[in-house]
Amino acid sequence: MHPVHDVDSLLILAIALSSKRRPAELVEIVSATDLLQNNIPNETKLVEAFDRLAKHGLLKAEAGGFALTAEAQAIITGLPRKAETPERLFAIKDRLSVYNVKGEHAGVTVDPADVTKAILAHRASEKTTAKNLLVPKPKPEAEVHKPGQRQRKPMPARKRRV
C-alpha cells in the first residue's frame, strides 16, 4: 500500500480498539483516536483515510459502523502489548508499507458533516462527569508498598536452657 499516511495507521489502531465485539460508530472511533494521540485529525484527512483503507481492503462498513477486515486484523496481530502508542503506530505503518492489495474493493463514503458531528459529540462528552472507559489506567510513578507486604523481622533464636 503506497503511500502510507500517519492517519491510516492511527485509524486502524483506533478501529481495532473501539470495535471489539461489534462494528464501531464514528463517535467511538473519534474518541479512540483522541485517546491514542491526544489530538483528533482534521475531518478531511479522516474522510480520505476511511476511503483509502476501504479501497485497499482493510476496512468495511457494516451495521451502521466500521470494522476491520481479516487483512487488517492480520496487520494488528502480533503488536507488542506493552509498547507505547507511538511504537505501535510505527509498527502498523511499517506493516502497511509492505501490504499488497489483492483484488478490487469498494470505497467507503463518509460524510464530512458526520465526522464533524462525531467530533463535537466527543468533545461534549468530555465535559460531562461520566467516566470514560477508554481512558488508560494511570501508572504509579513510585513503588507503592501495600499494607501487609513489608519485610518482617525473623523470629529471635531461642535461648538454650542448661
Image: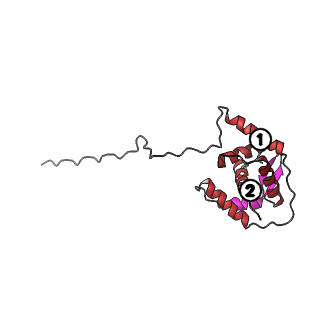
The x and y percentages for residue 129 are 65, 31
The x and y percentages for residue 29 are 74, 46
Q: Secondary structure at mark 1?
A: helix
Q: Is residue 152 above or below residue 55?
A: above
Residue at (81%, 50%) from the top-left corner?
47
The x and y percentages for residue 93 are 69, 61
> The residue under label 1 is which amino acid type?
Ala
Quarter holding the N terminus is: bottom right
- Residue bounds of the magenta highlight: 57-78
> The residue under label 2 is which amino acid type?
Asp
Pick whichever of labels 2 and 1 is earlier in the sequence.
Answer: 2
The x and y percentages for residue 66 are 79, 50
| Residue picked out by circle 1 | 118
| Residue picked out by circle 2 | 8
Q: Residues within 10 Å of mark 2 (few under 14, many from 20)?
A: many
Which residue is at the far left? Answer: 162
Do we see residue 50 in this rendering? yes
Horizontal arrangement in the rendering, residue 128 relative to residue 159 (left or right): right
Quadrant in which residue 89 is drawn:
bottom right
